[in-house]
DNA sequence: CAAAGTTAAACAAACGTTTAATTAAAATCA
DNA sequence: TGATTTTAATTAAACGTTTGTTTAACTTTG
């Protein structure tokens, strides 16, 4: 689906509001008002509120696939380096599109929109397969342990990042960093998250201390 | 707030539906129909849909506080044993009240109901304080590392469990355990989660391999 | 002038809540 | 205990809003 400027403007407004109030908690009038367009434009451009949500999903997910799979094929990197890059890749993606990931959590929690759920699931399955291959490669090379639960490991990465993103205000308070500029804090948070998860993964994957 | 039999029946129906469809995605008529009562009973008993949600929160959270804090004071346990018990405690709680935890994720994601959000935050803060004390104790006794990010560590526990609970059907498919009875699978999942998180925590907390 | 974009108004359906009438249960009194 | 009154529980119907979507008239663009 090709999107013109106005469509993207509407979608991004919707994205913000969905993240703040949930899909059902946001009316098409709210979206239209905040985007500065007439209510009818949403039906005109997307057909329905539901289909606009699907367009948002397509816009955000469509661009991701390629980078991950090309990363895996890079022969100059060790398995552990690849895993670490996947971690940073994931952190960046979530922190850069926080609104979208909040929405996705809601969509997955409530089994509402089947089209999106199915698409999200297929993305997850492909990711798991890619990582599984990567782990097998590491095991063959003798740098990774034999028994590794890939899904639980992925859940730890995804869960830790989501949980941290959702409660970052609280993290900031707890560490008394309210006076720090927003951008600086986000960088700090990403760096700490990266180190934290890489430590965890190293403990799961390798035999080192 | 004292709850009679019928009120609890309504609340538990609401809990299930909220988890399936979200708060705004569930109408009071849906709840009333499924609970087998008249629509007006919800306003009659709770005042409003919003206040019913708060009653649900009170019902589920009210009972938890005591166990954790008494566990901490137990002098016969080592710091690592206490941490491990907190992990199992958390896994049990989430897996036993899956619907409620799904709802809570939605409530925290969308900053809608301020009363619940405030209460949930205060629970989280107290938990973090308790764990921080526990970590300090372990550090004093020389069994834990010096620099530990308690919040990130907690986020890993909470995030991993949430993520695993939400996608357990998918985990089941991936590991080809669809033929396993539900109860058996849940036990298996809890055991694996427990081992997984304890391994992670050991890597964060101690200097051992 | 035809196509696409934009608008205010109207649409029926669904929403949370309230009302007023009725039934069931509990409390009071003879 | 049995009749009577008071309170609580339950109901169907109606309330006014808000919901997502559509219409038909109008404006802008190519």
Image (cartoon, coloured by chain):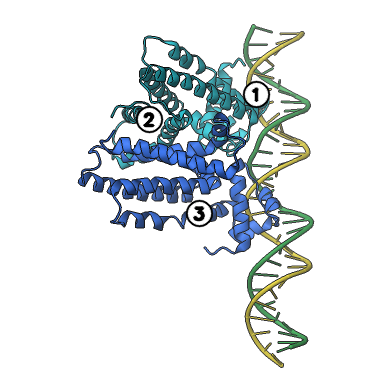
Chain colours: A cyan, B blue, C yellow, D green
Q: Which residue is mark 1?
A: A46
Between marks 1 and 2 in the image, the one whose residue lies nearer the viewer: 2
Chain containing the residue with disc 3: B
Q: Which residue is mark 3?
A: B60
Q: Nearer the viewer, residue A124 or A7?
A: A124
- Relative placement, left or right, of B43 versus B142 is right
- Relative placement, left or right, of A100 versus A139 is right
Q: Looking at the image, is A107 positioned above or below residue B81?
A: above
Q: Secondary structure at mark 1?
A: helix
The residue sitting at 56% across, 63% down in the picture is B3
x and y percentages locating residue C15 in the rendered image? 66, 46
Quarter of the image with the N terminus of chain A is top right
x and y percentages locating residue A33 in the rendered image? 57, 32
Between marks 1 and 3 in the image, the one whose residue lies nearer the viewer: 3
- Relative placement, left or right, of C10 versus B18 is right
Is residue B79 something one can see in this rendering? yes
Chain containing the residue with disc 1: A
Q: Nearer the viewer, residue B97 or B116?
A: B97
Can marks 1 and 3 be said to lie on one chain?
no
Q: Nearer the viewer, residue B130 or A147?
A: A147
The residue sitting at 36% across, 18% down in the picture is A81
């Amino acid at each position: 689906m090709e999107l013109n400027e106005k469509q993207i403007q509407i979608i991004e407004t919707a994205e913000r509001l969905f993240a703040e109030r949930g899909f059902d908690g946001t009316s098409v009038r709210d979206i239209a008002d905040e985007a500065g367009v007439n209510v009818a434009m949403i039906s005109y451009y997307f057909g329905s509120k539901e289909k606009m949500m699907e367009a948002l999903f397509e816009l955000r997910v469509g661009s991701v696939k390629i980078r991950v799979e090309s990363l895996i094929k890079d022969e100059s990197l060790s398995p552990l380096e690849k895993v670490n890059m996947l971690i940073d890749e994931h952190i960046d993606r979530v922190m850069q599109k926080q609104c979208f990931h909040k929405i996705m959590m809601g969509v997955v929690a409530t089994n509402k929109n089947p089209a999106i759920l199915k698409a999200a699931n297929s993305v997850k399955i492909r990711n798991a397969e890619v990582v599984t291959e990567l782990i097998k490669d590491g095991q063959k090379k003798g740098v990774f342990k034999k028994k590794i639960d890939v899904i639980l490991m992925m859940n730890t990465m995804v869960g830790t990042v989501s949980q941290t993103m959702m409660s970052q205000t609280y993290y900031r308070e707890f560490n008394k960093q309210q006076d720090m500029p927003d951008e600086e804090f986000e960088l700090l948070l990403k760096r700490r998250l990266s180190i934290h998860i890489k430590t965890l993964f190293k403990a799961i994957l390798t035999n080192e201390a």
